[in-house]
Amino acid sequence: MEPRHKVLLAYDGTTPSRQAVAYLDRVFGHREDFGVTVCVIARRPPSYLLQSGGGKSFLEKEDLLDKAISESLAQAREVAERGRALFSVLPREAVETKVSLQSGDLAYEIIREAESGYYDAIVVGRRGLSRVTQGFMGSVSYKLAQHARVPVWMVAGKEWNHRVLVAVDLGEPGFRVVDHVAYTFALDPRVEITLLHVVYPWVGAEPRTQTLKRVARELEVSEEEETRGFFERARKRFEEEGFPSERVRVKIVRSIFGPASAILREARREGYGTVVVGRRGRGGFKGLLLGSVSTKIISTLKDRAVWLVS
């Protein structure tokens, strides 16, 4: 029977992708409704194999290319099976493999597979899939975070737990984050969830010359009704999925340093293994593929799993 929840694990056998396996096993291994597809994309052999010269006929070169493609796919299948074998908690029938031949940009191949297969999320090791050492901002992971319409779970570190910090604003982007978390952890008896809303006083075009106390009070008054409505809606969403709202904590903090700093501090101080953020808040510029908050979180929090929800 098809599992209710399924994720696409972009796997290449490197340490970051093996860490992604360990994360899924640790956090979801007890779930009977959770499935994983280990996806390996085989590299296409270079096109120069068909170029003229070298004393071989076109048919001979075509045979060489076919042989090279077959070898690349066979190697990819071996990598996928080794990745599948790393799962020690999830039952074998819950883990599938999928191998395809690369035809374009690696990140877009993964995105196309995730969207066409109706996966709930893409899971990837934080440093991406390339064997070339490079900064995170230029990696496959970052391209996935930029362009995937499905949530992207980026895994780093080695120690994880069932404590989840969910950073939300009060708009629709924030509720999409809540919706993804509620759906993913429906009926999960182990997970602990905290919804974190950061009140950032220094907003608006006009300069703030009042005292911090006065600004904070003005924000409390202006956001009181919206805050109440948002968290009431969130409560109903969790209960629709069978997750008791009593097990969802709500924490509202005030930070003069901005939401990202508050989220990072909370994640580290309270030891959350997974941090969930929206790709952009409701105030984000449409021209930016990642918001300033999500960019800072994924580039700074290197010892946690970070989920990005569009």
Image (cartoon, helix red, strand yellow):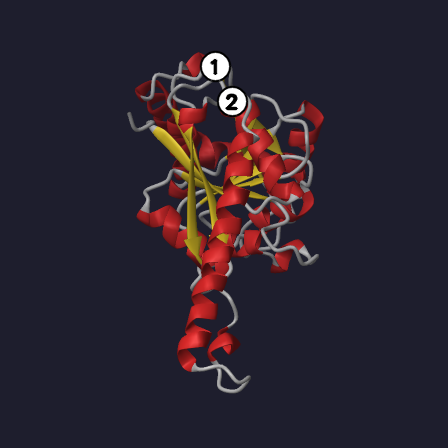
Question: Can residue 214 be seen here?
Answer: no
Question: Can residue 270 be seen here?
Answer: yes
Which residue is more in the foreground, 184 or 7? 7
Q: Residue at x 45, y 12 (%)?
A: 246
Residue 101 percent location from the top left of the image: 43, 57
Real-space Cα separation, disc 1 to disc 2, in angstroms: 7 Å
Q: Does dot 1 land on a helix, a strand or a loop?
A: helix
Which residue is more in the foreground, 107 or 224? 107
CB within 8 Å, label 1 to label 2 = yes
Q: Does dot 2 land on a helix, a strand or a loop?
A: strand
Q: Is 143 above or below relative to 90?
A: below
Q: Residue at x 46, y 35 (%)?
A: 223
Q: Is 49 above or below relative to 249?
A: below
Q: Is 106 above or below relative to 198?
A: below
Task: Count neighbours of disc 2 (C-alpha within 10 A) and say few if under 14, some if 14 to 19, many if 20 or more.
Answer: many
Amino acid type shown at disc 1: Arg
Q: Which mark is residue 280?
A: none
Q: Which mark is residue 247?
A: 1
Q: Is 1 above or below relative to 72?
A: above
Residue 131 percent location from the top left of the image: 65, 55
Residue 60 location, quadrant: bottom left
Give the labeled residue for mark 2: 193
Residue 249 percent location from the top left of the image: 51, 19
User: Mark 1 or 2 closer to N-term?
Assistant: 2
Q: Residue at x 38, y 21 (%)?
A: 186
Residue 97 percent location from the top left of the image: 43, 39
Amino acid type shown at disc 2: Ile
Which residue is more in the foreground, 126 or 43? 43
Q: Residue furthest left?
A: 1
